[in-house]
């Protein structure tokens, strides 16, 4: 019985150390140098090559290394009955919320403007704060924490989700009420899971319905955004700018127009990277649970896509 780590381009060492700390007896192999494929019962995945799981005939459980599972579900060759779990972890949530708060404050306190003023030695004390009202698309563990903390900081917050919710502690809109949601806010934070329903949701048609000058923060997936629509929406002043951590192609190609766009602030998919020490215990716990036939932590509903 062993676990395979399949994460091309990501150093597996921190995960190996963290998993060993939680369970010193766990045998771990690292793709592509797997010596005993028939002994593999668990897989820890980050952007695995499509089809590769068929090399492990005794696989019982696949775990994402992160919060997202789109990279697993996009592999149509995965056995239909293979349980899939994802990471939900306080440390990951904390990093994500900190990042979003930074993006919101960056807009609210106009850091870009003052950086530009500094370059030109301009001292301009007018209108130091842009009033903000924040709409969070995606109200799962991550979205909820963002709503809660921004609300605590005194900002008006609104959530938008794909399911009906009662007893939600913040104003909540289901996707059918997208326009009303957009009218309430001037910052949009995308924290949706990537599913066929949410792919390309951030597009020109939606931006047109925003309050003029709305600020976009995308920390979910690149494929939520129709990238060619973003500079157009900024040009037309539907949006004042964007704070992006994710892109359709990563690393972002050198000739991508986003590099040159002053209104777009970018980071290289680092908003919230799973901390192996924090997340390994839940991977180990799920291995125990699947062996004992107990309900898994953070199971993925394949139909829903998250
Ligand atoms: C990061 O993108 C994650 O899915 O955890």
Image (tube, helix red, strand yellow):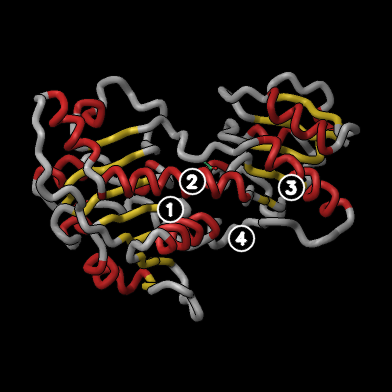
Relative placement, left or right, of 10 versus 59 is left
Dot placed on the residue nearer the N-terminal end, 2 or 1: 2
Foreground mark, 4 or 2, reads 2
Dot placed on the residue nearer the N-terminal end, 4 or 2: 2
Q: Residues within 10 Å of mark 1 (few under 14, many from 20)?
A: many
Dot placed on the residue nearer the N-terminal end, 1 or 3: 1
Q: Nearer the viewer, residue 34 or 114?
A: 114
Residue identified by numbered label 2: 96
**For the point 17% across and 37% down, which residue is it?**
113
Foreground mark, 2 or 1, reads 2
State the count of labels. 4
**For the point 82% across and 38% down, which residue is it?**
22
Residues at marks 1 and 3, CA–CA distance in whole angstroms: 22 Å
Rendered position, 301 above or below 165? above
Label placed on residue 282: 3
**The image quarter in which residue 21 lies:** top right
Foreground mark, 4 or 1, reads 1
Q: Position of residue 91 (x, y in %)?
A: 60, 45
Label 4 CB-ligand 1 distance < 8 A: no
Label 1 CB-ligand 1 distance < 8 A: no
Residue identified by numbered label 1: 191
Residues at marks 4 and 1, CA–CA distance in whole angstroms: 18 Å
Secondary structure at numbered mark 1: loop
Residue identified by numbered label 4: 301
């Amino acid at each position: 019985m062993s676990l395979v780590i399949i994460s091309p381009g990501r150093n597996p060492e921190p995960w190996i150390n963290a998993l060993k700390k939680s369970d010193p007896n766990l045998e771990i192999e690292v793709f592509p140098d797997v010596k005993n494929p028939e002994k593999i019962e668990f897989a820890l995945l980050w952007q695995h090559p499509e089809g590769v799981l068929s090399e492990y005939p005794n696989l019982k459980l696949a775990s994402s290394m992160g919060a997202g599972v789109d990279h697993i579900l996009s592999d149509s060759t995965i056995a239909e009955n293979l349980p899939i779990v994802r990471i939900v972890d306080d440390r990951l949530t904390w990093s994500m919320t900190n990042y979003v708060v930074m993006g919101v404050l960056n807009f609210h306190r106009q850091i870009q403007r003052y950086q530009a003023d500094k370059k030109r030695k301009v001292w301009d004390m007018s209108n130091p704060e842009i009033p903000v009202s924040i709409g969070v698309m995606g109200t799962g563990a991550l979205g909820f924490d963002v709503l809660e903390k921004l609300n605590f900081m005194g900002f008006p917050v609104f959530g938008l989700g794909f399911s009906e919710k009662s007893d939600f502690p913040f104003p909540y809109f289901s996707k059918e009420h997208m326009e009303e949601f957009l009218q309430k806010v001037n910052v949009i934070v995308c924290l949706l899971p990537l599913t066929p329903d949410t792919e390309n949701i951030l597009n020109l048609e939606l931006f047109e319905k925003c309050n003029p000058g709305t600020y976009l923060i995308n920390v979910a997936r690149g494929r939520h955004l129709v990238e060619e629509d973003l500079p157009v929406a900024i040009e037309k002043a539907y949006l004042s700018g964007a704070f992006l951590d994710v892109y359709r192609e990563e690393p972002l190609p050198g000739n991508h127009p986003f590099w040159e766009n002053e209104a777009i602030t970018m980071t290289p998919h680092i908003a919230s990277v799973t901390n192996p020490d924090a997340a390994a215990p839940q991977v180990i716990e799920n291995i125990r649970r699947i062996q004992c036939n107990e309900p898994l932590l953070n199971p993925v509903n394949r139909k829903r896509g998250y």
